[in-house]
Structure formats: structure tokens, C-alpha cells
Amino acid sequence: MVLCTAWKTVGGVMCSAAAGQKAAKDSPLAMSFTKNNNSLKNFRFQPQAAYTAVASKGKRLRFGLLNIKVLPAPDTCNRFCFVVKKKNGNAVFRNRCRRVLRPVFFNEAKNFESPLWVMAMVDMNKANANWKALRECGEEAVRALGHSRFCTRAGNGGAAKRST
């Protein structure tokens, strides 16, 4: 009886797909990426208590299509969550909203002077979807958060600009 397995070449050696996946997972490059603090998963809220804390104690700001709740981070890491309600659209719409906002917030997080926990709630539905406007609202929010009083340890920076 012969067992069929998928074979591929890894580093000039023929091996099974399972062995290739294990070798890739154990490589120094993969291990350094998972330990790196710039991984996208490190920017997510971890326990349910983090969501509750930001939702209840966070300062509310409005930027066009986004309602932002922000709280100075009790830990040393910026964390973000993007909330799109089910009544706003189907799963494809909700995921696209997150996909548009995620790079805007994650790329600019390194410019914050001190860590923040940010909850961004999208106030747009599928019928009036404007992705460019959503991205611009996200960029405006990130600029304002980077210069807000939340980003200074002493709290003496300028307040976040609010727009309607």
C-alpha cells in the first residue's frame, strides 16, 4: 500500500507539504516576525474588559463618518478596534470598512507621543458608502489624536479638533 503525499522542493530538498510548513514555521525569520511588536495582532484589544473600559470611560470625538472613543493606554502599546454594526451592511461591507481604516491607524500609531486605546465606530451604511471619505475621516482623526492632550504625558497638549 502506497500513501500519497504532496511533495515540494524546499531548499533543494524534496519534502512533504507538512514538513515544509513546519520548517517555515520554525525558521528564524518567521519566529522574529511573531515576536515583533509591529505585528498587526499586537494592536488589537485583547480581553473583553478593554472594550468595556474604552466604551464606558473613553472620551468621545466625532470626525465625519467616524465616532472615536479614546482612552490613555494603561499598558505601553497602542491598541485599536473598529466597530461596524450589522445594521450598516453585510459582512463584505463591514470587512471593507475595517480594511480601509486599519492601515490608516496602524501606520500612524508610531507617531503618537504616548500610547492610546482607540475605538473607531463607523457611521456609514451600505447605501451611502464612500470609501475615499471614510479614509479621509480616518486620516483626520489620526492627525488630531496624534496632537491631542491624550498623547502627552502631562496632559498639557492641545485638545483634539472636533468636526461635525
Image (spheres, rainbow, N blue to C red):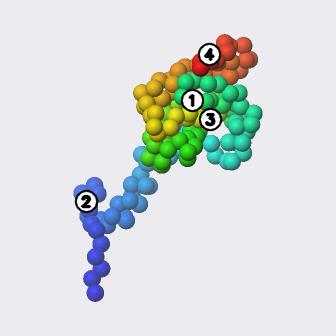
Instruction: Tell me, yes or no, whether the two marked residues, 4 and 1, touch with CB atoms within 8 Å.
Output: no
Residue nearest the viewer, comparing 103 with 66:
66
> What residue do we see at 62% from left, 42% from top?
45
Q: Separation of disc 4 and disc 3 at Cα? A: 17 Å
Q: Secondary structure at mark 1?
A: strand
Q: Residue furthest bottom?
A: 1
Instruction: Report the mark closest to the observer, 1 or 3.
Output: 1
> What residue do we see at 45% from left, 34% from top?
129
Q: Separation of disc 1 and disc 3 at Cα? A: 10 Å
Measured as percent of width and height from the top left, residue 114 is found at 64, 25
Disc assigned to residue 119: 3
Q: Secondary structure at mark 4?
A: loop
Residue nearest the viewer, comparing 75 with 107:
107
Judging by the rendered image, the residue that carries numbered circle 4 is: 161
Mark earlier in primary sequence (4, 1) = 1
> What residue do we see at 72% from left, 45% from top?
49
Q: Separation of disc 2 and disc 3 at Cα? A: 45 Å
Instruction: Tell me, yes or no, whether the two marked residues, 4 and 3, touch with CB atoms within 8 Å.
Output: no
Amino acid type at mark 3:
Met
How many C-alpha atoms fall within 10 Å of the one at disc 4: few (<14), some, or many (≥20)? some
Instruction: Tell me, yes or no, whether the two marked residues, 2 and 3, touch with CB atoms within 8 Å.
Output: no
Disc assigned to residue 66: 1
